[in-house]
Image (spheres, rainbow, N blue to C red):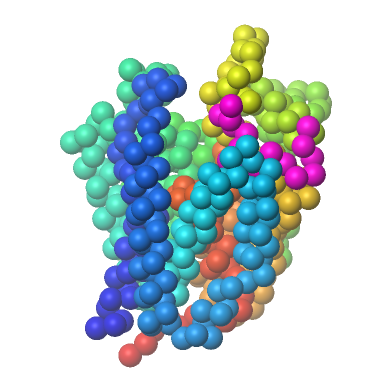
Amino acid sequence: MMRAATTFLSGFGLFIMIFTLNPFMGDVISEGDVGTTANVVNQIGYLGLGALFIFAMLASVAPRTLLKLISPSWLIIFAIAYFSCMQSYDPTASARGVTLSLVAMLMVAGVLVLPRSEKDFVEACANAVLLLLVINYAALVLLPERAIHQASALESWHAGYWRGHLSHKNVSAPVFSVLAMFGIYCIRSGARMRGWAITLLSVIFVLHTGSKTTIGFLPLAIGIVLCGSAIRSSGAIVIVHLCFAVLVACLTVGTIYSPSLLAMTAAVLDDPTFTGRDAIWQFASDSIAAHPWFGHGYASFWQSPVIRGMEANFEADWDVRGIVSAHNTFLDALLTFGIPGGGVIILLLFVKPLIDYIRADRRSGSRNFSEFCMMVILFMTYNGMMESFILNRADPQWMLLALAVFGLNMAARCNLRHNTD
């Protein structure tokens, strides 16, 4: 009975992480069309879910396993995050945001440790992901005004692109990309039929989001890991990934620092500005230099009173007064936490997992799971050059990245149980 309950709760946790507590919110019609209802639901809902998952873990998971979840890396990350709240114009609101991110981590941990075996994890999460995909495809037919971008929205040029239950196609595309990777993991772990269904339905969804960068990054991340796996070389995967990460960084945010890199990007892409992101990156970069040591504080820069009170720059492609992020998770980390703090967080979330993967690869029983987590890390590294999600409360992109980071750390430290009687 307990095994069935914990397995179900693991799948339920993954479902909520991706589906969120505010699905199908519809398009933003105007810049002021942002209410507080969603925030209240998130605060109350995730606190309740956090309590549920911590109770379940205390009741069913061995204390020795729970202690392994308390890693120095996560203590450092949240220590930096809470410290940054003191730099905020509203420290209390910032601290609430960090706390919501911390509570969301309880769900991430629960999804991983509650199942008694890897087989239980795959079974529960495959069913949860399939249900989520069925709901999204049904919504495309039954609720197209909620699941598909409309011409009447603020960003009318996105009309016709799929976004499903999430707020924007640029969020849906990476999330459904991770679901495609999870489908591959299911195929390799024995749940072949469900794995193929998840992979195909997810890839089709990604293609209909119209997100060109995501469509390019998805096969790149999968290909690097599977090719490296074929030659049994985790080191090769890490080296190739680091080379591509540097290349992507140079051809994206690097273009605001170097005319030569801008010329290279222009030779490869029709739009070297990435739909005007370069102007946002430049503004973010200049703002980092204004507060290099401690940053501007958690959730205390974009759309803050200082930014909203600026005069409009009519020469820029985007009005930064209405922008919600730097559209680059690495710039936002430095902007929020300062260069020292942001640099440490970037290393712990994007570099340390590479070391954990090499350690986990030595445990042959963890290979399929660790390679799934590695695909997610690679993909989110590249996607992070175009979008922001680090410590972004209950953002599915952030939670899926955290799941992969947690997972690799666990796989590096202990063997997975493949089945239990």
Q: Which residues are magenta?
A: 290-305
Question: What residue is shown at x 42% (from left), y 34% (from top)?
Answer: 168
Indicate the position of residue 174 as horizontal and vertical percent values.
48, 44
The relative height of residue 176 versus residue 57 in the rendered view (above or below) is: above
Magenta span: chief secondary structure: loop
The answer to which quarter of the image holds residue 268 is: top right
Indicate the position of residue 244 as horizontal and vertical percent values.
69, 47
The relative height of residue 101 versus residue 57 in the rendered view (above or below) is: above
Residue 121 colored magenta?
A: no
Residue 84 appears left or right of 108: right
The answer to which quarter of the image holds residue 5 is: bottom left
Residue 293 colored magenta?
A: yes
Task: Name the residue at the top extreme.
Answer: 314
**Which one is nearer the viewer's eye here, 318 or 197?**
318
**Which one is nearer the viewer's eye here, 180 or 108?**
108
Indicate the position of residue 182 as horizontal and vertical percent values.
43, 59
Q: Quadrant of the N terminus?
A: bottom left
Q: Quadrant of the C terminus?
A: bottom left
The answer to whether any part of residue 174 appears in the image is yes
Task: Name the residue at the bottom extreme.
Answer: 421
Residue 5 appears left or right of 35: left
Question: What residue is shown at x 60% (from left), y 45% (from top)?
Answer: 91
Residue 292 appears left or right of 209: right
Question: What residue is shown at x 29% (from left), y 70% (from top)?
Answer: 8
**Which one is nearer the viewer's eye here, 323 or 355?**
323
